């Protein structure tokens, strides 16, 4: 009997870890990605996703069961296909063009009894109303009668060493009981626990609830942080104290803003749909988004005030930014609030140098001078800004050497430290 063939469309932060886990579980895996440069790098054993080491990628390639490719004809004869392509916003509106392209390109290879699963984050109804007609039209087959269609949201948390794909419960759904069974069986080869739900719409909403919940709660503590500062109360200590309550409280921490491919975007998919379908505003989402997007400006103002009380104007001041990625221990600069903050400070006349050990230098804006974290750099700076608190950096040295530290992550303590 031939081995089961899996196609993973999109070899990014979501698709690559899935492809690796599937190879390791014994499947034949085609990693399809339109980015030919990315495919070439993957083929030569170079991973660009921090959680997938070159060693692991090399081992997958060495099995002969992982084929990175840009050619959709390599999808021919697939048993299961997972689509994990980007779902960004364009002018504040969901942009599903990548899902549409993937569905259209895949459709000719859909055959009776195969299974297609969407993993991209999107608004409820996408699998049924957008993907299904594309696959049916291009294949001449029908779901659920001829092939199986499902949705399973991804919960991957880049940089998290504890919760990985394999040990994070996976919500699964299908259009009809047979599809659900296929989707569930597929993921049970890869993850320890699946969570079946009744419909693709429920699964789609599940993902949006998770990220909306996070965005709203971060908005809450960010707003509280600004008030606490004015009231002279230590918000960080108050949050840590509240977190000792064993029930009914979940800790979220303030910061310089939100970024990445998910948090600033996913809740907008939900508010857009609520507006379109119900004509209502999703006020929580809009408020939280407003507060979170105002944080880089707030931090810039606090730094300017902090320098001013030390007799130094921001114009001409030398700033050392620690971390540019939106998330600690990753090099992901997409929509990072640090880039926004750097732009604002630069526009106000500051001279900025930045320490970012994780990011690919090709993705860093060219007007940012990248430096190593050294005592000289810290000593020469009028202010050190802790923006992304990557582990493994010498924060003790920073606190001992710096004249002034503005810490937006509660990583530093000491007489020269001012916290968000
Ligand atoms: N990154 C995360 O932490 C995370 C977590 C959960 C869910 N998600 C969701 O998963 C989806 C994918 O996110 P990601 O972070 O992996 O994106 P990514 O940008 O890292 O990777 C997506 C890949 O898809 C490729 N692609 C685009 N259109 C294609 C097409 N038509 N055919 C083949 N390849 C195509 C791109 O070249 C890219 O390499 C998004 O909907 C995102 O919201 C992401």
Image (cartoon, grey):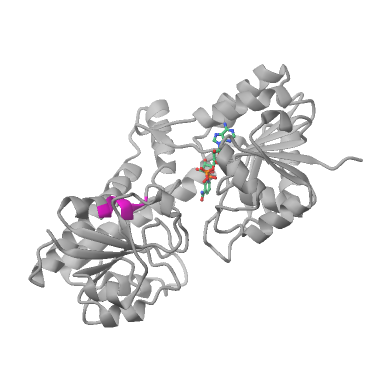
In this rendering, position of residue 186 left or right of residue 326: right
Q: Which of the 4 image quarters holds residue 51?
A: bottom right
Q: Does the magenta portion include 314?
A: no
| Main secondary structure of the magenta stretch | helix
In this rendering, position of residue 251 left or right of residue 162: left
Q: Position of residue 153 (x, y in %)?
A: 58, 44
Q: Quadrant of the C terminus?
A: bottom left
Q: Position of residue 176 (x, y in %)?
A: 70, 32
Residue at x-position 61% and y-position 22%:
134
Residue at x-position 51% and y-position 38%:
86
Total residue callouts: 0
Q: Is residue 254 visible?
A: no
> From what the image shows, is residue 144 above or below residue 241?
above
| Range of residues picked out in magenta | 336-342
Residue at x-position 45% and y-position 57%:
331
> From what the image shows, is residue 1 above or below residue 221?
above
Residue that protrudes farthest toward the right in the picture: 1
């Amino acid at each position: 009997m031939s081995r089961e063939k899996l196609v993973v469309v999109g070899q990014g932060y979501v698709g690559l870890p899935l492809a690796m886990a599937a190879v390791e579980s014994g499947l034949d895996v085609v990693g399809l990605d339109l980015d030919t440069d990315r495919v070439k790098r993957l083929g030569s054993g170079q991973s660009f996703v921090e959680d997938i080491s070159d060693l692991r990628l090399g081992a997958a390639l060495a099995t002969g069961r992982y084929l990175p490719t840009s050619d959709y004809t390599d999808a021919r004869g697939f048993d299961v296909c997972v689509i994990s392509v980007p779902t960004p916003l364009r002018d504040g509106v969901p942009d599903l063009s990548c899902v549409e392209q993937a569905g259209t390109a895949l459709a000719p290879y859909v055959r009776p009894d195969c299974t297609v699963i969407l993993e991209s984050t999107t608004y409820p109804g996408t699998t049924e109303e957008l993907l299904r007609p594309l696959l049916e039209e291009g294949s001449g087959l029908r779901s659920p009668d001829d092939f199986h269609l499902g949705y399973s949201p991804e919960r991957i948390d880049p940089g998290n060493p504890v919760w990985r794909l394999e040990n994070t419960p996976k919500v699964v759904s299908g259009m009809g009981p047979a599809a659900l069974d296929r989707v569930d069986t597929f993921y049970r080869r890869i993850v320890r626990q699946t969570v079946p739900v009744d419909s693709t719409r429920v699964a789609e909403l599940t993902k949006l609830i998770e990220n909306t919940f996070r965005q709203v709660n971060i908005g809450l503590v960010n707003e509280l942080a600004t008030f606490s500062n004015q009231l002279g109360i230590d918000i960080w200590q108050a949050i840590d104290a509240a977190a000792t309550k064993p029930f009914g409280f979940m800790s979220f921490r303030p910061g310089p803003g939100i970024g990445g491919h998910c948090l600033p975007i996913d809740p907008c998919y939900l508010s857009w749909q609520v507006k379109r379908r119900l004509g209502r505003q999703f006020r929580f989402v809009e408020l939280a988004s407003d507060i979170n997007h105002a944080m880089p400006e707030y931090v810039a103002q606090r730094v300017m005030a902090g320098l001013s009380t030390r007799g130094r104007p921001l114009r001409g001041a030398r700033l050392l930014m620690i971390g540019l990625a939106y998330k600690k221990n990753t090099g992901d600069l997409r929509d990072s609030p640090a880039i926004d903050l750097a732009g604002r400070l630069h526009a106000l006349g500051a001279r900025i140098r930045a320490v970012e050990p994780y990011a690919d230098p090709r993705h860093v804006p060219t007007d940012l001078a990248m430096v190593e974290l050294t005592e000289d750099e810290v000593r020469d700076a009028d202010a050190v800004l802790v923006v992304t608190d990557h582990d493994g950096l010498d924060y003790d040295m920073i606190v001992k050497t710096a004249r002034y530290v503005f810490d937006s992550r509660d990583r530093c303590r000491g007489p020269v430290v001012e916290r968000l």
